[in-house]
Image: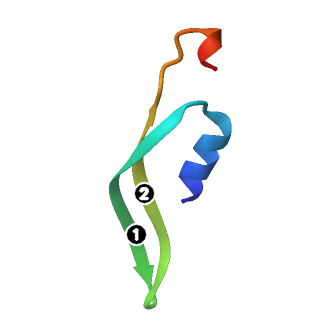
Amino acid sequence: MVGLSRAARTTRNLDWFEVESVRGYRDADTVAYYQVTMNLFVGVVDSEADL
Protein backbone atom coordinates (compact mmCIF):
# COMPACT_ATOMS: atom_id res chain seq x y z
CA MET A 1 0.00 0.00 0.00
CA VAL A 2 1.57 3.20 -1.18
CA GLY A 3 -0.26 5.41 1.32
CA LEU A 4 0.83 3.33 4.30
CA SER A 5 4.46 3.25 3.15
CA ARG A 6 4.48 7.00 2.62
CA ALA A 7 2.98 7.68 6.07
CA ALA A 8 5.49 5.35 7.74
CA ARG A 9 8.41 7.33 6.26
CA THR A 10 7.27 10.58 7.87
CA THR A 11 5.47 9.47 11.05
CA ARG A 12 7.02 7.95 14.15
CA ASN A 13 5.29 5.22 16.17
CA LEU A 14 2.86 4.23 13.43
CA ASP A 15 1.30 1.25 15.21
CA TRP A 16 -1.52 0.00 13.03
CA PHE A 17 -3.98 0.92 10.32
CA GLU A 18 -7.57 0.26 9.34
CA VAL A 19 -8.95 0.28 5.80
CA GLU A 20 -12.27 2.07 5.96
CA SER A 21 -13.32 1.90 2.30
CA VAL A 22 -12.12 1.03 -1.18
CA ARG A 23 -13.72 2.36 -4.33
CA GLY A 24 -12.73 2.61 -7.92
CA TYR A 25 -13.70 3.54 -11.45
CA ARG A 26 -13.88 1.08 -14.29
CA ASP A 27 -13.22 2.09 -17.90
CA ALA A 28 -13.15 -0.28 -20.89
CA ASP A 29 -13.02 -3.44 -18.73
CA THR A 30 -10.02 -2.23 -16.69
CA VAL A 31 -9.63 -0.36 -13.42
CA ALA A 32 -8.92 3.24 -14.41
CA TYR A 33 -8.23 4.42 -10.84
CA TYR A 34 -9.10 3.64 -7.24
CA GLN A 35 -9.20 5.32 -3.83
CA VAL A 36 -8.58 3.83 -0.40
CA THR A 37 -9.67 5.53 2.81
CA MET A 38 -7.48 4.54 5.76
CA ASN A 39 -7.26 5.39 9.44
CA LEU A 40 -3.71 5.43 10.78
CA PHE A 41 -3.02 5.05 14.49
CA VAL A 42 0.14 6.23 16.21
CA GLY A 43 1.51 5.74 19.71
CA VAL A 44 2.07 8.77 21.92
CA VAL A 45 5.59 9.26 23.28
CA ASP A 46 5.73 10.80 26.77
CA SER A 47 9.45 11.45 27.09
CA GLU A 48 12.73 11.50 25.20
CA ALA A 49 13.65 8.16 26.81
CA ASP A 50 10.76 6.47 24.96
CA LEU A 51 12.14 7.42 21.54
Kind of residue indicated by mark 1 = Gly
| Label 1 Cα neighbours within 10 Å, binned few <14 / some 14-19 / many ≥20 | few
Task: Give the residue at mark 2.
Answer: 36
- In the displayed structure, would residue 50 be above or below residue 25? above
Residue at 53% over, 17% down? 45
- On the image, the x and y values in percent for residue 17 come to 42, 45
The circle drawn on residue 9 is: none
Q: Does label 1 or label 2 sit earlier along the sequence?
A: 1
Is 41 located above or below residue 28 in the figure?
above
| Residue that sits furthest to the left in the current view | 20
Q: Looking at the picture, how far across and down is residue 19, in whole percent?
A: 36, 53
> In terms of secondary structure, where does tag 2 sit?
strand
The residue located at (44%, 60%) in the rendering is: 35
The answer to whether residue 26 is left or right of residue 20 is right
Q: Where 45 sits versus 42, above or below?
A: above
Q: Which label is found at residue 24? A: 1
Mark 1 or mark 2: which is in front? Answer: 2
| Left or right of residue 20: residue 11 | right
Q: Is residue 26 left or right of residue 50?
A: left
- Rendered position, 46 above or below 41: above
Which residue is located at x 60 percent, y 30 percent?
12
Q: Nearer the viewer, residue 15 or 37?
A: 15
Q: Quadrant of the N terminus?
A: bottom right
Residue 39: percent from the left, percent from the top? 39, 42
Under circle 1, the secondary element is: strand
User: Is 26 or 18 nearer to us in this picture?
Assistant: 18
